[in-house]
């Protein structure tokens, strides 16, 4: 009986204060410029709505910074899209399956991870128009984990087209960061 009490005491003493899935690193707050970089949005060009045909990813300062400060930059495919209709509007949950890690030491765990687009996202129209047709579509996902005011963490993201130009721009941005 004494060994059982001792084992339980050791087990409890060895338990961390944080849940097992809690990040072991300090996380930034989701505010200020971070809300521009990780805007929980899908670029229109990523779904074929190329408004600005002269856009060059290599010259995009936001893309460069987004790539450099992301927890991970991943080539992904959409696995699922679900819609929840609420009084305040629709919320979309997109299940993403990583295909290739382009950069980053902290990709989301698991075979898939979810991102949310709520009523405040500039991508509401894209989601309403494309919805489930996004399943299997490839994207470049820029993801970063942030701390919420209540102490929990939340993942924010930006989805870009999965193109040779975009991948090349990400590789260039990461190379520039390593030179610093």
Image (cartoon, rainbow, N blue to C red):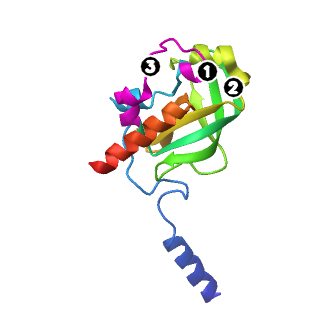
Could you tell me if the residues under marks 3 and 2 are in contact, i.e. CB atoms within 8 Å?
Answer: no
Could you tell me if the residues under marks 3 and 1 are in contact, i.e. CB atoms within 8 Å?
Answer: no
Q: Which residue is mark 2?
A: 134
Spot occupied by residue 131 in the image (x, y as percentages of width and height): 69, 21
Looking at the rendered structure, which numbered label has been put on residue 55?
3
Q: Is residue 63 magenta?
A: yes
Observer able to see residue 38 = yes
Disc 3: CA contacts within 10 A as few (<14), some (14-19) or many (>=20):
few
Spot occupied by residue 61 in the image (x, y as percentages of width and height): 34, 29
Spot occupied by residue 40 in the image (x, y as percentages of width and height): 51, 28
Which region of the structure is painted magenta?
45-66
Taking 135 as reference, is 58 left or right? left
Could you tell me if the residues under marks 2 and 1 are in contact, i.e. CB atoms within 8 Å?
Answer: yes
Placement of 10 over or under 140, stated as above or below = below
Placement of 29 over or under 105, stated as above or below = above
Task: Determine whether the residue tagged by mark 3 lies in a helix, strand or loop.
Answer: loop
What is the C-alpha distance between the residues marked 3 and 1?
15 Å
Placement of 55 over or under 135, stated as above or below = above
The residue lying toward the viewer, choosing from 51 and 13, is 51
Identify which residue is drawn at 40% across, 35% down: 66
Quadrant in which the N terminus appears: bottom right
Q: Which one is in front in this view, the residue at disc 2 or the one at disc 1?
A: 1
Q: Which residue is mark 1?
A: 47
The residue lying toward the viewer, choosing from 120 and 80, is 80
């Amino acid at each position: 009986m004494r060994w059982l009490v001792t084992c339980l005491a050791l087990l409890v003493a060895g338990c961390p204060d944080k849940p097992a899935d809690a990040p072991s690193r300090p996380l930034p707050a989701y505010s200020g410029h971070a809300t521009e970089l990780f805007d929980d949005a899908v670029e229109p060009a990523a779904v074929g709505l190329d408004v600005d045909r002269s856009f060059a990813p290599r010259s995009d300062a936001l893309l460069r910074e987004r790539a450099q400060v992301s927890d991970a930059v991943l080539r992904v495919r959409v696995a699922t899209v679900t819609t929840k209709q609420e009084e305040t509007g629709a919320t979309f949950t997109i299940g993403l399956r990583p295909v290739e890690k382009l950069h980053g030491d902290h990709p989301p765990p698991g075979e898939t991870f979810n991102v949310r687009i709520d009523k405040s996202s500039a991508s509401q129209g894209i989601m309403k128009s494309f919805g489930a047709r996004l399943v299997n579509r490839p994207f470049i996902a820029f993801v970063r984990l942030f701390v919420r005011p209540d102490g929990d963490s939340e993942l924010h993201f930006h989805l870009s087209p999965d193109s040779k130009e975009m991948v090349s721009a990400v590789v260039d941005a990461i190379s520039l960061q390593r030179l610093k």
